Amino acid sequence: MAIPIPEKGRIQEQIKEALLAGITPQQLFEAGFAPGSIGHLVYRLSSQHLVKRPPGFVGWYQRSRRGYILRRDNYTCRKCGAFGPNVELQLHHRDHNKKNNGSFNLVTWCKECNWSEGAKWAKLLREKRPKKKNGDMVRAAEVKQDEKERRSRLQVEWNAARIEDRRIKVEEARAHKETAKMLSRMSSFVGQLARSFR
């Protein structure tokens, strides 16, 4: 089986067929499939004993996801715009949940921005704890209101990032479609050439 080109609406089926035919996750990733989709299906199919999980798959999956996010963000800090060989890039979790590793939640930041945000977050958590004031606890309503405002701010950032990610995926799909058209034109041209020499 040849390595497929991603088609909108059939990506999961294509990956499953390719994995069952013996194509490696690395080859699918290089063909343009997202590492999240590949990883999900490899884990699911290997738990059903339909395919063997390749050696070193977990490390590859983590590296490819990191590489996917870095390429998506053009190897640039999305907070301050820093880029170049001397900038150490890290992945930042928008919702500050280290277990939520979805593409929409991960964004590329430089080390300085990521650390400063971590320090701000820790300070914010310390400030949100109710404090004693003249023997009384600070009103819980104030704390709830601050938490509500913070969550709404995070939701706005999250939605903006999702819109940006969708825009990038649409552009990638257009590029894949144009490549597929070009390949089909080339194959029909080669077929015509072959027929003309008969």
Image (cartoon, helix red, strand yellow):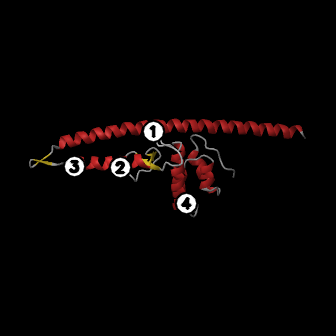
**Does the rendering let one see residue 64?**
yes
Q: Disc 3 designates what residue?
A: 129
For disc 4, the marked residue is 57
Query: Dot 1, crowdedness within 10 Å: few (<14), some or many (≥20)?
Result: some
Q: Nearer the viewer, mark 2 or mark 3?
A: 2
Residue 190's spot in the image, x, y percent?
80, 40
The residue tagged 1 is: 162
Q: Are marks 2 and 3 in contact (CB under 8 Å)?
A: no
Callouts 2 and 1 close, C-beta under 8 Å:
no
**Which one is in front, 116 or 149?**
116
Decide which of tag 3 and tag 1 comes sooner along the chain. 3
How many angstroms separate mark 2 from mark 3 (CA)? 17 Å
Q: Which mark is residue 56?
A: none
Which of the two discs, 3 and 1, sits closer to the camera? 3
Label 4 SS: helix
Q: Tell me the distance, in whole angstroms, between the alpha carbons under discs 4 and 1.
A: 28 Å
At x 76%, y 38%, the residue is 186
- Which comes before the other along the chain, label 2 or label 1? 2
- Which quadrant, please, contains the C terminus? top right
Q: Classify mark 2: residues with Cα within 10 Å, few (<14), some (14-19) or many (20+).
A: some
| x and y percentages locating residue 127 in the rendered image | 23, 47
Three-letter residue code for mark 2: Gly
Amino acid type, residue under disc 4 in the picture: Phe
Q: CA distance from mark 2 to mark 1?
A: 22 Å
- Residue highlighted by disc 2: 118
Q: Are marks 3 and 1 in contact (CB under 8 Å)?
A: no
Specify whether 107 is left or right of 3: left
Marked residue nearer the N-terminal end (4 or 3): 4
